[in-house]
Image (tube, helix red, strand yellow):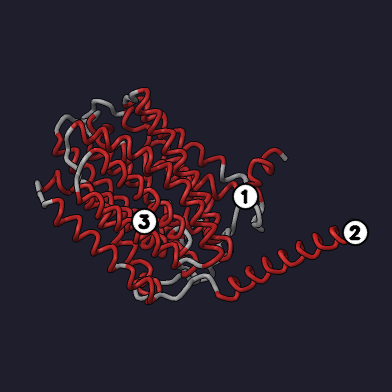
Amino acid sequence: MLQEVNLRLFRKGLTISPKRFTSVTILVSTTLAWFFVTVIFFEDILLSQTSDISLVYLGEVLFFGSSAFFAVLGSWIDEKISRRKLLITWVGLGIFASAAPAIFVGANLPEFVSILLGLSLGLGFPCCMAYLADCTVVEERARISGTIVFVTFILAFLIFAASSLFSFGIMETVLVLVLLRAISLFALPLDYCNKKDQKNSSWMSVLTNKEFAFYIVPWILFNVAGGLSWWLIPQTPEFQQAVSTGTILRYATAAIFGLVSGVVADRIGRKKPIVVGLISLGVGFAFLGLATSSLSIIVYLTISGFAWGSFLAIYLAVPGDLAFSGAKGKFYAIGAFAPLIIYMSLDATPELSGINIPAGLLSGALSAMIFLSVVPVLRASETLPQALIRERKLKEHIKKVTELVQKSEKTKGR
């Protein structure tokens, strides 16, 4: 009963059962929070293994590359064994990988730790996301995704704020990562949503899906632009302090607007929130390029949090909306995972290559890229059926009319 009361705010109007809602939310949100926290502290994690900064950058490449490789492998394994077995194995592997930096501290094994972390992320990610798609219906998927985004960024916000306040060392960081993955274990016994797919579909059938391409291209461009935006921020102590402050605000706004966008996307469709998110990020890039200062960085990161929350809520739902029989894991491997890998990889590129592009030129190019990416969204078909949108509007209209009639009758009775 207490669990039902606590979740009532998020579950209002949803038909999904409390146990299933809790299971999906815990499993996916802790996984995503683990990913974001790992990326934030990745350099510190590898510096516990080596003092060679070039090996740290190599470790980043290995982490993202192995994550993508094992995501592809994991989607194949998901077709061969039961979902429960794969998820339990994956979470257990994640707990061990999270503890590895402490277990192997001083062992000078940065490449091994990087690949192990990538394995623990990628192997079960498509299966985890397919679980979300199978446990939700199209008219509720965005709201549930928005709730997941809210929980994800609230966790990341609290962890990053605590780290800044208490100056986390490697052991504290490892403990947080282990706890995040361990919490996922509580999700699996709550409910088990069987696979709905009957036959397996090929990767080519996913890659050649035109509607999926219309949706995935803007998401990829969004992540490319987001990764390149870090090139605009000078690597000095003053600006890095602004980044720390802005990141905390970014997670807060991402949490709020992820929840809002999920609700909106289940009412009016997926396309409009995507367009709003793209425009807001384009404005943020323009603002950042006008004058790079501590204030502009904080404002940009706050605005980008709005865009990130909106996009993640939508793109946790869209692959599930479009996926056909036997391809949910593949849709999510490409639609949700690959763009995030691109974003995080580009984040490290300036340090690796030494490339330096004038801020005004780069911000203008990023804004143009974002605004142009609106075009494929406008060409895409809405994944939320129009009949469901009209049905919801009709129900709301009937409810309002009923309330007005009841109010009128009470007034006459007086």
**Looking at the image, which is closer to me, 96 or 359?**
359
Q: For the image shown, how many numbered marks are present on the structure?
A: 3
**How would you rate the neighbour count of disc 2 (Cα within 10 Å): few for under 14, some for 14-19, many for 20 or more?**
few
What's the CA distance linking mark 1 and mark 3? Answer: 25 Å
Asked if the residue at tag 3 contacts the one at tag 1, i.e. Cβ–Cβ closer than 8 Å, the answer is no
Indicate the amino acid at tag 3: Phe
Secondary structure under the numbered disc 2 in the rendered image:
helix
Residue corresponding to mark 1: 191
Residue corresponding to mark 2: 413
Q: Quadrant of residue 224?
A: bottom left
Tell which circle, 1 or 3, labels the residue nearer the N-terminal end: 1
Residue corresponding to mark 3: 337
Tell which circle, 2 or 1, labels the residue nearer the N-terminal end: 1
Secondary structure under the numbered disc 1 in the rendered image:
loop
Q: Quadrant of residue 198?
A: bottom right
Q: Residue at x 64, y 57 (%)?
A: 14
Q: Quadrant of the C terminus?
A: bottom right
Indicate the amino acid at tag 1: Asp
Secondary structure under the numbered disc 3 in the rendered image:
helix
Q: Position of residue 102 (x, y in %)?
A: 33, 27
Q: Quadrant of the N terminus?
A: top right
What's the CA distance linking mark 2 and mark 3? Answer: 60 Å
